[in-house]
Amino acid sequence: MNGNCWLPNLEYYDYYDSWDEYQDTLYSIFKSDFIDSHSQFEGKQVNIRRHPIEYGKEEAFFHVTCQDYLKDGERVPDFRRCERIRWVRAFIENYKCDSTLCDECDGVKVWKMPYKSNYRVHMLLEEERYMVVVEPRENYCLLITAFYLEHDHTLRKKVKEYEANRDCV
């Protein structure tokens, strides 16, 4: 895993003395990547959902580090997401990577899916089982979420979504 030419190293919890120290480091990385500076997607600045702010951290931070397992709004840390905190910006900046450009991977699968009156762009690096979702708006793009696909059936479902929608990009 993580033999890809553009993916940053994982940020493992094992290297920290406490959850608070680990979360502070994760937030520092997130803040550097999405608050102190901005990436671009299709020529538009990528912004984050800031509100509600909880524990001094923006909503988007929790979307890329936590899972709402019970779908009740209660987010629980997801260590697979946390470890990949550096990958979110890397995906946005390297989504055009394909197998002809990179010997290390099969390329990022990119497709659009309708969402309300708009659409969302899904970016999946299948061999890493990781996905980032952004929503283009008129003047910017909004980071929606990023997550590790732990279950094989979920990965298969996303690949099927890609196959059905890849021509929509």
Image (cartoon, rainbow, N blue to C red):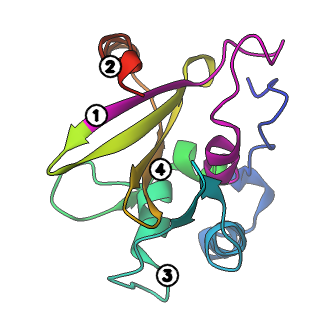
Q: Is residue 70 left or right of residue 87?
A: left
Q: Sequence order check: which comes first, mark 4 or mark 2?
A: 4
Amino acid beneath label 4: Asp
Q: Position of residue 131 (x, y in %)?
A: 49, 35
Q: Which dot marks residue 165?
A: 2
* Structural distance between the alpha carbons of marks 2 and 1: 7 Å
Q: Which dot marks residue 113?
A: 1
The residue depicted at 42 percent of the width and 79 percent of the height is 50
Q: Sequence order check: which comes first, mark 1 or mark 4?
A: 4
Q: Sequence order check: which comes first, mark 3 or mark 4?
A: 3
Vertical placement of residue 73 versus 158, above or below = below
Vertical placement of residue 78 versus 27, above or below = above
Q: Which residue is disc 3 drawn over?
A: 57
Q: Position of residue 162 (x, y in %)?
A: 38, 18
The residues colored magenta run 86-113
Q: From the viewer's perspective, is the residue at label 4 or at label 2 nearer? A: 2
- Residue 129 visible: no
**Disc 2 to disc 1: CB gap under 8 Å:** yes
Amino acid beneath label 3: Lys
Label count reads: 4
**Disc 3 to disc 4: CB gap under 8 Å:** no
* Structural distance between the alpha carbons of marks 1 and 4: 25 Å
Task: Assess whether residue 154 is covered by the magenta stretch.
Answer: no
Q: Is residue 166 left or right of residue 61?
A: left
